[in-house]
Amino acid sequence: MLDYAPDLDRVFHALADPGRRTMVERLSRGPASVSELGQPMEMSLAAVLQHVRVLEACGLVTSSKVGRTRTCSINSAALRSAESWLADRRTMVERNLDRLGEFLAATDTQEQP
Amino acid sequence: MLDYAPDLDRVFHALADPGRRTMVERLSRGPASVSELGQPMEMSLAAVLQHVRVLEACGLVTSSKVGRTRTCSINSAALRSAESWLADRRTMVERNLDRLGEFLAATDTQEQP
């Protein structure tokens, strides 16, 4: 019964870090080099690369190297898989609340004189 | 420029664990006691309680104790905040891809003889 989805484990773990979310935020506006990703953050290039590797390992980001420049791009499918998981749970909660509301309304009507 | 949102840090961290996702999954169908949450998982009650505390700390779950029974409920607002963050990023990626598509189509038309 455990919700085994290793990719979701890694996607949610990757997004738990504010630095990595800033990188995802930047990449959602278009591809960027590793040094461009690091610019807004006071972080060494090695640290930025380490975050990029975490984002690549969970499938949120892909990268390719031309000469000395590694360019990163976002993979919207990984964003969508995490978003869908959350949306499915939220829809279920809201549906149950609606049913409860309908039940209470029906009970209230029956109790009217 | 860092995406500082301590709640999102904690919500995504909480969801990175398959056992905690199973609990969220169960609670999205309605409130449950701590022992009910633990039933489908081969986990001690102490371990279940520890996971419940992580889910409570990030706002995904609330709980109340009556007698010896602690009952947990889901908080859909926390699910929605994480879902919105992902949806905003994904929408941005898709919008940029659409723009690129329009640009390439326009370029293609201009190049037609």
Image (cartoon, coloured by chain):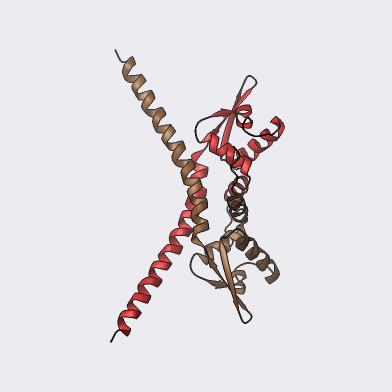
Chain colours: A red, B brown
Residue at point 35% right, 80% down? A107
Q: What residue do we see at 38% from left, 70% from top?
A: A99
The residue at the far bottom in this view is: A113
Using the image as rendered, state which of residue B99 and residue A111 is in the foreground: A111
Q: Residue at horizontal 49%, vertical 69%?
A: B30
- Front residue of A2/B85: it is B85
Where is the C terminus of chain B found, in terms of image quarters? top left
Rendered location of residue A94, percent (x, y): 43, 63
Does residue A52 lie above or below B105 as drawn?
below
User: Does residue A101 appear to the left or right of A63 in the view shown?
Assistant: left
Placement of B54 over or under B113, stated as above or below: below
Q: Horizontal placement of A99 versus B38: left or right?
A: left
Relative to B110, residue A12 above or below:
below
Left or right of A106? Residue A46 is right
Say above or below: B22 vs B64: above
The x, y position of residue A56, in whole percent, is 61, 38
Q: Residue at x 57, y 67 (%)?
A: B62
Q: Residue furthest top?
A: B113
In the image: residue A49, left or right of residue A76: right
Q: Quadrant of the N terminus of chain B?
A: top right
Measured as percent of width and height from the top left, residue B84 is found at 48, 49
Residue B63 image point, x, y percent: 58, 70
